[in-house]
Image: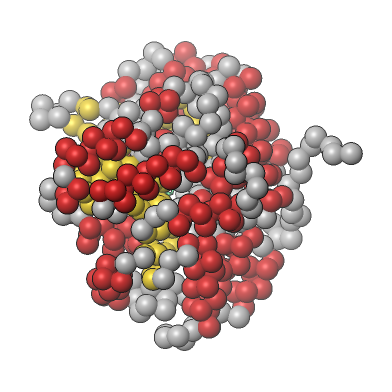
Amino acid sequence: MEFKTIIEPFRIKSVEQIQLSTAEQRQKFIREAHYNPFLLRSNQVIIDLLTDSGTSAMSADQWAAIMRGDESYAGAESWYRFESAVSDLTGMPFILPAHQGRAAERILYSIRGGKDKMFVSNTHFDTTRANIEFTGAMAMDIPVKESANFSSEERFKGNLDLKLLEDQILANGPENMGGVIVTVTNNSGGGQPVSFSNLKEVSRICRQHNVMLILDACRIAENAYFIREFEKGCEQYSYSEIARMMCDLCDAVIMSAKKDALVNMGGFLALRDKKLADECIQSLIITEGFTTYGGLSGRDMEAIAVGLKEVFNPDYLRYRVRSTGYLGDSLKKSGIPVMSPSGGHAVYIVASEFYSHIPVNQYPGQTLVCELYKAGGIRAVEVGSVMFGKYDEKGDLIPARYELVRLAIPRRVYTQSHIDYVIEVCDHVYKNRKEARGMKITYEPGFLRHFTSRFEPV
Ligand code: F0G
């Protein structure tokens, strides 16, 4: 007999106290943080859903592996264990360790980018876009049209639009294409998965035109879960086999290990081409570290090597995706507009519908993250015009494609009662939505403004 309750497939060995607070305290905290949850102290937060990145709880096996970290400058045993795990996952001959995803991005895109270069992606993550645009290159998002339909239950809304891909390659000329980036799962596009068949077609088109295909593999295990469960013909493969088959279609794999490697820090760049690898290695040594540690301690590499195996455990992946779905489905039942179906790592609230009375240039998503914090001490992140908006020559806002708020779920950290609390708080904020006001920006930097911008209620 199979019971319907899906339990957390782990038990708790070490705990971390959550500091509770009152609504009055939180009013003061968020005002002092200039209405930007990135500027809160973590002990002012009750449930931290800001990110699933670097926030995983590590397993006893990972902590044990940390103890055998070999901190030799060159040729550490830990490096060889790390390299072997990354090589099993990606099948790539050249593996460059990096301290996190964006360091690997900077190395690759500063070499592949530059003025007149074009990158296309299902959706560039913010650091990906910033690293590309910083070199003077352009970054264009070409997700499939269904990705804009938040309520449809269609699977694989993270797919790339194949027609637009071909159009862009022909319009720019293959020689001006810096690369095609497929992000799995499509984080900034609602955490939606990419199908194997879509990636295969993207790969065929890239190979036909000799354009480089890069897999942003942060959440590749979660994406592999969706492929195996929902794509015809894929159920015969294991999750790790599917992940490897995805990498096999690409020329490079970039991974922030802070997600699906279940660690707090780390990343890598894996490449097929020796000439490009040699160029990247130079940059790696100058800025990150020697080729056998690249900004990581031996113990970090040990934890990654273990995490990259653990994450493909079927019980873990099933729990992971089903528990995220539980949050998404419960919010939907309360009438809250969320992106459907739920992805693997997060639930995305459609802030523009949640606060339909707040115009885009008053940042409904920023209002929502502040209200969630004030009501229940929940920290979430705006993924909308604060993160991705631009200005035209007149200084008017060019809004982002969508106004979303992401509730990202740290891996193996919160239990169902924590999530039930989140559901109750969201429900309360939704019932009082009419009283909420928009926000205006009082300070902003030039790049990645969401991290440090300051706001005031209008
Ligand atoms: N690519 C994707 C798809 C990401 O989600 C992230 C990070 C990165 C690259 C950069 O990796 O943080 O290790 O430098 N995403 C985090 C998030 C920050 O909250 O979604 P990093």
Res 123 seen here: yes
Q: Is 317 placed above or below 302 here? A: above
Q: In which quarter of the image is residue 35?
A: top left
Viewer-closest of 384 and 246: 246
Looking at the image, the residue that sits furthest to the left is 393
Viewer-closest of 395 and 77: 77
Q: Is 371 placed above or below 258 here? A: above
Q: Is 78 placed above or below 98 here? A: below
Q: Position of residue 247 (x, y in %)?
A: 46, 56
Q: Position of residue 178 (x, y in %)?
A: 23, 52
Where is the C terminus found, in terms of image quarters? top left
Residue drawn at point x = 17 percent, y = 51 percent: 175
Looking at the image, the residue that sits furthest to the right is 1
Q: Quadrant of residue 420?
A: top right
Residue drawn at point x = 59 percent, y = 56 percent: 240
Q: Count numbered badges in the picture.
A: 0
> Which colour style is shown?
secondary structure
Q: Position of residue 311 (x, y in %)?
A: 61, 56
Residue drawn at point x = 16 percent, y = 37 percent: 171
Judged left or right of residue 44, residue 414 is right
Judged left or right of residue 10, residue 94 is left
Where is the N terminus found, in terms of image quarters? top right
Viewer-closest of 159 and 16: 159
Q: Where is residue 198 in the image (x, y as percent from the top left)?
A: 44, 39
